[in-house]
Amino acid sequence: MDMLVVRGGHSLRGAVTIGGAKNAALPIMAASLVAEGTTVLHGIPDLVDVTTLSHVLRSLGARVTRRIDGAIEITVEDQQPCLADYELVRRMRASVCVLGPLLARRKRACVSLPGGCNIGHRPIDLHLKGLRALGAEITIERGYVFARADRLRGTDIYLGGSFGSTVTGTCNVMSAAVLAEGVTRISAAACEPEVVDLGKMLNAMGARIEGLGTPLLRIEGVKHLDAVEHTVIPDRIEAATIMIAAAMTKGELTLHNVSADHLAAVTDVVRSTGAVVEFSDSQAIVRATKAPRPVDVTALPYPGIPTDVQAQLTALLALADGISIVTDKVFPDRFMHIPELMRLGANIRREGASAIISGTNRLSGTCVMASDLRASAALLLAAMAADGESIIRRVYHLDRGYERLERKLNAVGAEILRVVDDPANMPGSLQLSMDDQSTPSIDSSDTPPPPKFLRHHEFGKASEKREANSRP
Ligand code: EPU
């Protein structure tokens, strides 16, 4: 298992190119199951989650290959398999996105229930409600969803739940309704750009979906869909993470391949903290010179602030000059990053679905543990802004959803090393002894003690070793 060694305190400066959206790529890859021919997808990021879904699709009779130019080709060669196994689905819950496409094209599906998740309770009752409304017979047995429908029939479906709309639920029901007989109207549909991207690809395949990007979708079923070539949208969550990195390190970054529209809510928050954000074409410039101002933030379904940026904004506001309240209305329990941010010196109290953050002017590097994808991004941001060195463990969470994030950050001035999680790789500065007890606590002094860094040549050696290991 790898860990990241981060030496904090560098302002990030330069340009970063944002990759394709993970959360668009996954349902889009799954939807390739409904088409005849070879689907060619551009901009699919090279992530562990994409690899996992490729395995799921292969197990379902598809040939999935990554071309030399990076495009992914998916061709269904065998329409018989219908089982998405627990061993794969438990690794990535977005595997459930194959349910709707399988039911529509193969009339049956057997998909494992994904199980628990570190960001809170994540049922799929709304997915099942929508598919049942289309005429599917669904039972849950031995941890699997068994779904069958000789014919799917269009109908009116309300897909809202206690926490708003469902993103992958809308993808599943939409991907099934495109091949149903007659007209389906989905109300309280998710409006996220990733759902729109999927809808656009299905329309290019021959589907008839109207209302994409609104809560009311009208889908006229068709008999047949043909594979197409499609480019996924830029990843707005990666872009938001990089914007926050610039703000937290008082740096200046240019982001290439971004959509200003998709980032409106996050941009508003980042600007409210005092940073400058300017957009032109598909490019953004983010600049910050001072500590952030405190802001109250509520994560909501799109076009609100994404829950997938809540942890990163919490890290930013941990350095604000005052008190901020961050509330998550989509995943009210998505706060596993708080105790780890507190290990870095943040002052945060959780109350229900909110984090009450009393900003500090200094974070102090230490060893922290990532609990999920976005929590790991938040810890990385905080470690980059902290004094001294930090270790981020369980970094496999980060690799599920960010493509070579530390390389992108290192290219603009960060100092992040990926090493094997082994005591031998622990930086000397984090190996405290009883003699260090006189070190002042971060609350008791305005003048921080000098950090005890790994000696520079050690950092360099480890970096070279890592680069050598990562060469093909
Ligand atoms: N919900 C239900 N019943 C359902 C489905 C959802 O009650 O049948 C609830 C959930 O428990 C949650 C809320 O509705 O409280 C929203 O969940 P949603 O279904 O929209 O989430 P998802 O589709 O499972 C996608 C993203 C998540 C992102 C959420 C919210 C993908 C592959 N995943 O999940 O991304 O947080 O939407 O925007 O698209 C991530 O990238 O780190 C990530 C977790």
Image (cartoon, rainbow, N blue to C red):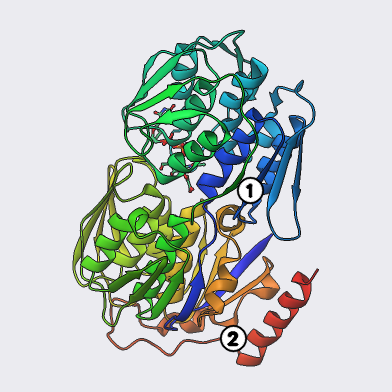
Location of mark 2 (residue): 454
- The reply to whether discs 1 and 2 touch (Cβ–Cβ < 8 Å) is no
Kindly report which numbered mark, 1 or 2, lies closer to the viewer in this rendering: 1
- The picture places residue 462, in percent across and down from the top left corner, at 69, 81
The mark found on residue 342 in the picture is none
Q: Earlier in the sequence, mark 1 or mark 2?
A: 1
Q: Which amino acid type is marked by label 2? A: Leu
Image quarter (top left, top right, bottom left or bottom right) of the C terminus: bottom right
Q: Is residue 419 left or right of residue 289?
A: right
Ligand 1 positioned in quadrant = top left
Q: Is residue 252 above or below residue 374?
A: below
Give above or below for 210 relative to 321. Answer: above
Residue 123 point in image, percent of width and height: 46, 28
Nearer-the-camera pick, 370 or 466: 466
| Picture coordinates of residue 445, whole percent (x, y) | 28, 84
Residue visible at 54% across and 60% down in the picture: 19
Of 107 and 117, nearer the camera is: 107
Q: Which mark is residue 41?
A: 1
Q: Secondary structure at mark 2?
A: loop
Circle count? 2
Say which quarter of the image contains residue 244.
Answer: bottom left
Question: Is residue 53 shown above or below 393?
Answer: above
* Quadrant that contains the N terminus: bottom right
SS for callout 1: strand
